[in-house]
Image (tube, rainbow, N blue to C red):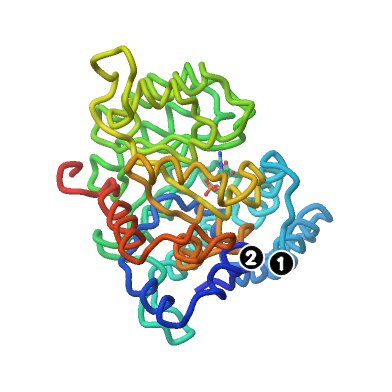
Amino acid sequence: MPEIAGPAAAALSSLCPDDVIFLRSLPKAELHAHLNGSIPIKTILELAQEHSHYSALTPEVAETIERLRSGVILNEIFDFFPLFPAIYALTSTPEAVAISTRAVLQSFLNPASDGAENPQCAYLELRTTPRATKYMMRERYLTVVLDEIEMYPATQAALIVSVDRRMSDLDVEECVRLAIEMKNNGRRVVGIDVCGNPRKGDMQPFTRHLSRAKGAGLGLTVHIAESTENTTEDSLALLSCRPDRLGHATFLSDELKALFFADIPQPGTECSLLSECPCIEICLSSNLLCKTVASLDAHHIRYYLKNDHPIVICTDDTLPFRTSCLGEYAMLLAQPPLGLGLSRDDVARVARMGMDAAFLRPHHD
Ligand code: 5GP
């Protein structure tokens, strides 16, 4: 179990031991975790140590590692993305990718060393952006990650292939093609994700690749309306591909919700464009620490809970956000202002919704 800090730790430490036992025992699905954002700090430090043997760490890399170790403070969401080049400098070889993936899987799926019987989550859909470096091609990167994921049973772990908003058309095409080919070859790829700096990229050209992925039987999740700078056109392009799940959706307008979510009433019209309700991947600590929401009280999770819309509670990036599945669930159960003050029954219902939103379900196979 990772060491946690910040809002998740505050919520968890406010709970009585019985509540913690209850939360630990709930089967949870982690459906929004970025591989390179979830590497345990211990593994990062070990990789940095090794790295320093063959090439000195640049001052920028060393500084970011120190920030990750001592606790990152962000002024806004756009300060978050510059953390990744340093992490990528440590995970550029197939060996380092294997070590990192193994450590991430263990942290989510192996019972904790602190004596707790339950792992952080019962089921993990880990996502990662296939990276070509001077040591490997994208295909090798994915193979290394899948080799580690498939050490676990299919009921426990699967892979979502991310495409980054900054990618060229050719790069997106390659990532989606690899995902489809690997799935068709029996590898455990279950979905496609669109991620990366919300300021970057035009989503319109992505749509034909995303629709192709859906047509090939892959689940689709997209980071959407994550910042106030994301335009309606940006969200419309992503929603036109009929995603099964939405990452964050913090600033999705009421008009778009009414148009695309079958469970939200649409004044004056008789049908909605979507017949299903895409599940919203909620990352409470991430949103608070990136300052895209001012407080838990103002968090969009309240809207979705009130409308009984499917949600799943996720960690996003446990490394910079210093959280865990348990910590995020603690924020549901803790009393305000540290948490939302939900009842145990409601928290159990939210956990079940998460399990139901997994891509690896019989009708997706
Ligand atoms: P990776 O895909 O390399 O395993 O994980 C790190 C990448 O995930 C980052 O470079 C970034 O593109 C993406 N990512 C991680 N967290 C977030 C987030 O909260 N929002 C968005 N849009 N992208 C993220």
Q: Is residue 244 left or right of residue 229?
A: left
Above or below, 132 against 47 in this view is above
Counting from the top left corner in percent of width and height, residue 197 is at 61, 35
The amino acid beneath tag 1 is: Arg
Figure quarter occupied by ligand 1:
top right
Q: Residue at x 46, y 60 (%)?
A: 332
| Residue located beneath label 1 in the image | 69
Would residue 146 appear left or right of 318 to someone viewing this image?
left
Q: Which residue is mark 2?
A: 44
* Helix, strand or loop under label 2: helix
The numbered dot on residue 184 is none
At numbered mark 1, what does the secondary structure look like: helix, strand or loop?
Answer: helix
Left or right placement of residue 247 versus residue 74 in this view: left
Q: Which mark is first along the chain, 1 or 2? A: 2
Q: Is residue 67 visible?
A: yes
Amino acid under disc 2: Ile
